Image (cartoon, rainbow, N blue to C red):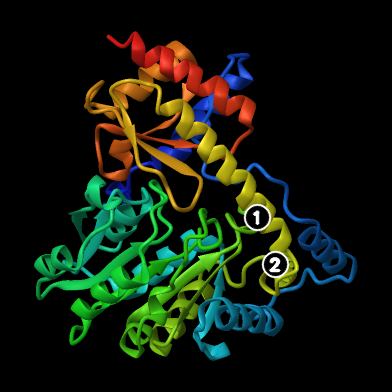
């Protein structure tokens, strides 16, 4: 007998597509997967060396729920150095990936009928987490003409007396757009005088191109700092997806205490070895690795855009960050699920339908793969679109 809340959850479409692609590959199918939301680079050596050293020293014991003092200090220093944010150690907690950070935060803040504003297109798990907590997702469409970002006016018009939270993701998944400091300041101004919390998902923070600046929402003002939960991790920027290292920081100590209690009764501390491994990444030992990764991603982005530009009846926003392209196929097919299923069946290319991100008539393509596979995959997509029926 399942609970009502467990029945409201939809399967993660990104994970479902990746699983299907892997199953078809295992059967011998010539599948090109452009769906994966993880870097294809190996974890930097400094991180692996720190993990090996921790294992050899016998550091596989339980830690405090929030994390080792050393890792909390490393996060504190990172937030100050990179984002000019001052947090006390007691205002930080590590989690099992940034997804876990988001889930625990939403569970501790959202109750029945609370409204949570989510810009579209959104990362697939945001509305599901809100629904599981009993809340109501309220979607604001980010227009393609505005880089799929919402405006202060849209935000103002969506706030009601039930609004409890705004979820922001910059750089964003699935688009890769980044809110400028001016845009964030305008959004922050709208929230002044309200009790609305902001979940700022900054997991792609260091994957930026064309020298585009990044601004943490909490750094906008003292008011923004007080209402923001800063969420980050190393799955993307540190090429550590399977290590499951995430963290959150908030001036709301009641929230951090509640998250500690929830985590203490569920996962307890996150993997102790992952904590030790993350310290050099947070302290800057992998900055050159991240820089190199960004440069390669930028070249791949440019390669993919140059090929897509030659395909008729589609359009694509040029992303400032992350490693995705969100492709408009409305002139070809408005049903993104139908399009992506046929693409996988006929051309053996796996991409993610836009409906999973709240915007039909689009699909998400990941360029976190080799140039060879990008070229080969886009050649198949081009052929598929040209002959689409």
Viewed as shown, does residue 280 lie left or right of 388?
right
Element class at badge 2: helix
Residue under the point 36% across and 81% down: 220
Residue assigned mark 2? 281
Q: Give coordinates of residue 315: x percent, y percent.
A: 31, 32
The relative height of residue 173 versus residue 378 in the rendered view (above or below) is: below
Q: Above or below — where is 282 with respect to 308?
A: below
- For the C terminus, the image quarter is top left
Does residue 367 appear in this view?
no
- Mark 1 nearby-residue class (10 Å; few <14, some 14–19, many ≥20): many
Alpha carbon distance from label 2 to label 1 = 10 Å
Q: How many marks?
A: 2
Residue 289, image quadrant? bottom right
Query: In the structure shown, which secondary structural element does the residue marked by tag 1 occupy?
Result: loop
The image shows residue 345, relative to residue 178, as above or below, that is above
Residue 196 in the image, given as x and y percentages of width and height? 24, 78
At 61% across and 72% down in the image, what residue appears?
Answer: 269
Q: Which mark is residue 240?
A: 1
Q: Earlier in the sequence, mark 2 or mark 1?
A: 1
Disc marking residue 317 = none
Question: In the image, what residue occupies the spot 40% across and 18% down?
Answer: 343
Q: Is residue 149 above or below residue 16?
A: below
Q: Is residue 32 left or right of residue 159?
A: right
**Mark 2 surroundings within 10 Å by alpha-carbon count, few (fewer than 14), some (14 through 19), many (20 or more):** many
Q: Are marks 2 and 1 in contact (CB under 8 Å)?
A: yes
Residue 170's x, y, as percent?
40, 61
């Amino acid at each position: 007998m399942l609970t009502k809340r467990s029945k409201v959850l939809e399967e993660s479409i990104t994970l479902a597509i990746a699983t299907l692609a892997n199953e078809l590959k295992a059967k011998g199918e010539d599948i090109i997967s452009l769906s994966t939301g993880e870097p294809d680079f190996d974890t930097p050596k400094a991180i692996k060396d720190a993990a090996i050293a921790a294992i050899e020293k016998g550091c596989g014991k339980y830690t405090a729920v929030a994390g080792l003092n050393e890792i909390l200090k490393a996060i504190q220093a990172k937030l100050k150095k990179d984002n000019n944010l001052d947090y006390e150690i007691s205002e930080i907690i590590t989690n099992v990936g940034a997804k876990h950070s988001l889930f625990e935060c939403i569970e501790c803040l959202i109750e029945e009928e609370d409204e949570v504003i989510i810009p579209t297109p959104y990362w697939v798990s945001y509305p599901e987490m809100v629904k599981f907590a009993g809340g109501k997702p309220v979607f604001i469409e980010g227009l393609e003409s505005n880089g799929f970002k919402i405006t202060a006016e849209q935000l103002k018009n969506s706030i009601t007396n039930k609004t409890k939270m705004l979820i922001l993701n910059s750089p964003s998944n699935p688009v890769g757009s980044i809110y400028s400091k001016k845009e964030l300041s305008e959004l922050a101004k709208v929230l002044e005088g309200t009790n609305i919390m902001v979940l700022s998902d900054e997991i792609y923070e260091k994957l930026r191109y064309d020298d585009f600046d990044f601004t943490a929402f909490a750094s906008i003002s003292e008011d923004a700092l007080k209402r923001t939960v800063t969420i980050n991790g190393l799955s993307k920027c540190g090429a550590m997806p399977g290590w499951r290292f995430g963290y959150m920081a908030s001036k709301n100590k009641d929230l951090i205490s509640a998250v500690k209690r929830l985590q203490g009764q569920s996962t307890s501390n996150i993997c102790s070895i992952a904590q030790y491994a993350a310290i050099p990444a947070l302290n800057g030992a992998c900055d050159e690795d991240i820089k190199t990764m960004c440069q390669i991603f930028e070249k791949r982005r440019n390669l993919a855009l140059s090929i897509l530009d030659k395909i008729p009846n589609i359009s694509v926003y040029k992303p400032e960050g992350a490693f995705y392209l969100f492709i408009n196929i409305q002139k070809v097919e408005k049903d993104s699920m139908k399009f992506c299923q046929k693409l996988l069946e006929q051309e053996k290319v796996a991409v993610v339908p836009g409906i999973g991100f709240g915007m039909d008539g689009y699909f998400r393509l990941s360029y976190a793969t080799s140039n060879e596979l990008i070229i080969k995959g886009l050649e198949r997509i081009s052929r598929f679109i040209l002959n689409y029926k």
